[in-house]
Amino acid sequence: MALTKAFVDDLVADFGEKFVSVCSQYGEFTAEVDKADIIDVLTRLRDVYKFEQLIDISGVDYLTYGQDEWKTQSATSTGFSRAVVKGQLLHKEPNVAKKRFAVVYHLLSLSLNVRIRIKAFLAESDLMIQTSTNVWPVANWHEREVFDMFGVMFVGHPDLRRILTDYGFVGHPFRKDFPQSGYVEMRYDEAQKRVVYEPVEIDPRVNTPKVIRHDNRYLNEE
């Protein structure tokens, strides 16, 4: 079933001020919720609105949100000669304001065949939010991944530890300010007969966008 306007209106009217903001476009619905209300909202969505299934929990780092370092020229009719030129930053400073990080819950109602997203923002100085494992047990591994990749602490989680990186890993790889080369590297030391960690020796590098400026196969086409 499509996400109808009547269904969205019911959600907005029911939750009221607990929905800080809402966005309903192209058949998709996203609501921002204060982190203090997140468990109440998720529980009511499960019990009253039949969102029985938690599809995923994802983290977002908005550190460079609003920055525009690369300007794109308009494309030709063939679409192959669009070029990217170096531009000016719209905001010279990174986004270190209150809303740098967000935790996003992707929900599915099997009964109604409807999907929605619930988003809660976290301040960089207070990366803590209540666990949703009591609402959906499957949240266990999803929250561990967000903790591992972004450093978000899920209060009350039964086993909050890294799930993708090594236990001795330093930092959180999905943060925008995490270096591509990381901070340490590991190797097996034959003399010590164990794995050792050392400062990374790879030189830092910056990704350059790969852009197709011209395609000779289409030069003779009208």
Image (cartoon, helix red, strand yellow):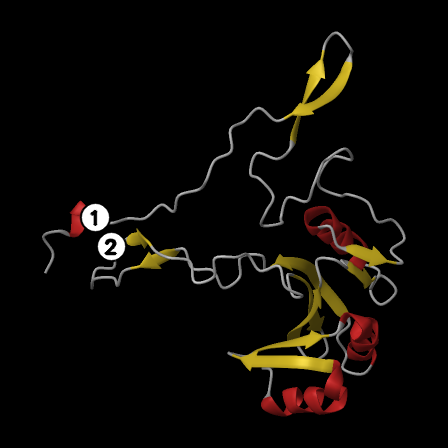
Residue 109, located in which quarter of the rendered image? Answer: bottom right
Q: Residue furthest top?
A: 191
Identify the residue shown where x is 83% and y is 71%: 39
Location of residue 18 in the rendering, given as x and y in whole percent from the top left corner: 75, 82
Of the residues shown, which amino acid type is indicated by label 1? Answer: Asp
Residue 134, located in which quarter of the rendered image? Answer: bottom right
Give the side of residue 127 with respect to residue 81, left or right.
right
Number of numbered markers = 2
Give the side of residue 203 with respect to residue 78, left or right.
right
Q: Which is more toward the observer, 65 or 91?
A: 91
Is 199 above or below relative to 37? Answer: above
Callout 1: few (<14), some (14-19), or many (20+) C-alpha neighbours within 10 Å? few
Give the side of residue 176 with respect to residue 79, left or right.
right
Give the side of residue 164 with respect to residue 60, left or right.
right
Location of residue 85 in the rendering, given as x and y in whole percent from the top left corner: 30, 53
CA gap, disc 1 to disc 2?
6 Å
Callout 2: few (<14), some (14-19), or many (20+) C-alpha neighbours within 10 Å? some
Label drawn at residue 215:
1
**Residue under numbered circle 2:** 80
Is 206 above or below relative to 55? Answer: above
Mark 1 and mark 2 in contact? Answer it, CB < 8 Å: yes
Of the residues shown, which amino acid type is indicated by label 2? Answer: Phe
Q: Earlier in the sequence, mark 1 or mark 2?
A: 2
Rendered-image quadrant of the N terminus: bottom right
Location of residue 139 in the rendering, given as x and y in whole percent from the top left corner: 79, 59
